[in-house]
Image (tube, rainbow, N blue to C red):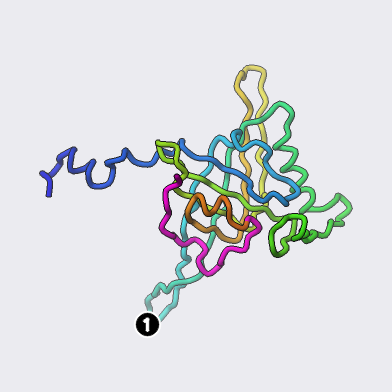
């Protein structure tokens, strides 16, 4: 064992490769059959690796509360997007939300099932939902980890402030609800079924990733 407070011991304990960097990531909408998607993944400026939550189930007995394991819960997921001058990505999200919420007269368009033949993927899925993928890269450029979000749809499209005394590129946030996420090997996730046929029993679980070649 190394000397206490030794910098060499600290680095060799788990940071020998320098540690993961939050700037080395990519977020993409991998569901090629989705009606509305982000057209340019490079404009997604910021996002997050999802949290893992289990809600406590409180049971009262003898004047005390005991906490048992409850349901898995999945937080709303938010990304920050740089605005392209044509508003292409933002209008895709606007159209997606309008398709979900319906028209001003209260009527809503029924979600359609995707044709498994045209998508070349077995099974069907409602086209109101999408699938997103977060890829974490190493400093060597290898895609090491992926987090896939299933049955994802936008809940909030944030405002864009405007001002005469501002000279910056516009950006905004999009919040998404989803049913569950899975974590796995980057290469396998990139080539796996993208229409959400992952095993919900292992949702949010951590499988041992394999570095991409």
Q: Is residue 4 magenta?
A: no
Q: Where residue 40 sits: x, y (%)?
A: 65, 36
**Which segment is the magenta one?**
194-213
Q: Nearer the viewer, residue 14 or 82?
A: 14
Q: Is residue 205 magenta?
A: yes
Q: Where residue 89 sits: x, y (%)?
A: 70, 37
Q: Using residue 85 as the reference point, say whether residue 25 is left or right of it.
A: left
The residue at the far bottom in this view is 62
Q: Nearer the viewer, residue 42 or 81?
A: 42
Q: Using residue 101 as the reference point, say whether residue 79 is left or right of it.
A: left
The residue at the far right in this view is 105
Name the residue: 63% across, 17% down: 165
Name the residue: 62% across, 50% down: 176
Q: Where residue 136 sits: x, y (%)?
A: 47, 44
Name the residue: 66% across, 46% down: 156
Up-down relation of residue 121 to residue 95 (above or below) = below
Up-down relation of residue 91 to residue 111 (above or below) = above
Where is residue 44, by image quadrant?
A: top right
Q: Main secondary structure of the magenta part?
A: loop
Up-down relation of residue 18 to residue 120 (above or below) = above
Name the residue: 57% across, 45% down: 78
Q: Where residue 45 sits: x, y (%)?
A: 56, 35
Which quarter of the image is occupied by the C terminus?
top left
Q: Using residue 213 as the reference point, say whether residue 1 is left or right of it.
A: left
Q: Tell me the crowding category of disc 1: few under 14, some 14 to 19, or many 20 or more residues within 10 angstroms, Cα based.
A: few
The residue that mark 1 highlights is 62
Where is residue 18, by image quadrant?
A: top left
| Number of numbered labels in the structure image | 1
Q: Nearer the viewer, residue 106 or 206?
A: 206
Where is residue 163, by image quadrant?
A: top right
Disc 1 element: loop
Q: Nearer the viewer, residue 18 or 172?
A: 18
């Amino acid at each position: 064992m190394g000397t206490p407070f030794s910098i060499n011991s600290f680095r060799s304990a788990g940071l020998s490769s320098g540690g993961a960097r939050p700037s080395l990531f990519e977020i993409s909408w991998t569901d090629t059959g989705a009606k509305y998607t982000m057209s340019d993944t490079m404009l997604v400026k910021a996002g997050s690796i999802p949290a893992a939550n289990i809600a406590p189930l409180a049971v009262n007995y003898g004047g005390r509360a005991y906490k048992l394991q409850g349901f898995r819960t999945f937080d709303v997921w938010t990304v920050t997007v740089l605005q392209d001058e044509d508003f292409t990505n933002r209008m895709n999200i606007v159209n997606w939300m309008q398709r979900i919420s319906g028209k001003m007269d209260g009527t809503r368009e029924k979600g359609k099932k995707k044709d498994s033949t045209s998508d070349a993927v077995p099974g069907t899925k409602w086209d109101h939902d999408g699938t997103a993928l977060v890829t974490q890269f190493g400093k060597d450029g290898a895609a090491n980890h992926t987090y896939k979000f299933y049955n994802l749809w936008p809940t909030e499209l944030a405002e864009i402030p405007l001002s005469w005394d501002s000279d910056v590129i516009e950006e905004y946030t999009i919040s998404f609800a989803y049913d569950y996420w899975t974590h796995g090997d980057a290469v396998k996730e990139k080539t796996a079924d993208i229409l959400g046929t992952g095993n919900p029993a292992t949702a949010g679980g951590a499988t041992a990733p394999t570095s991409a070649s």
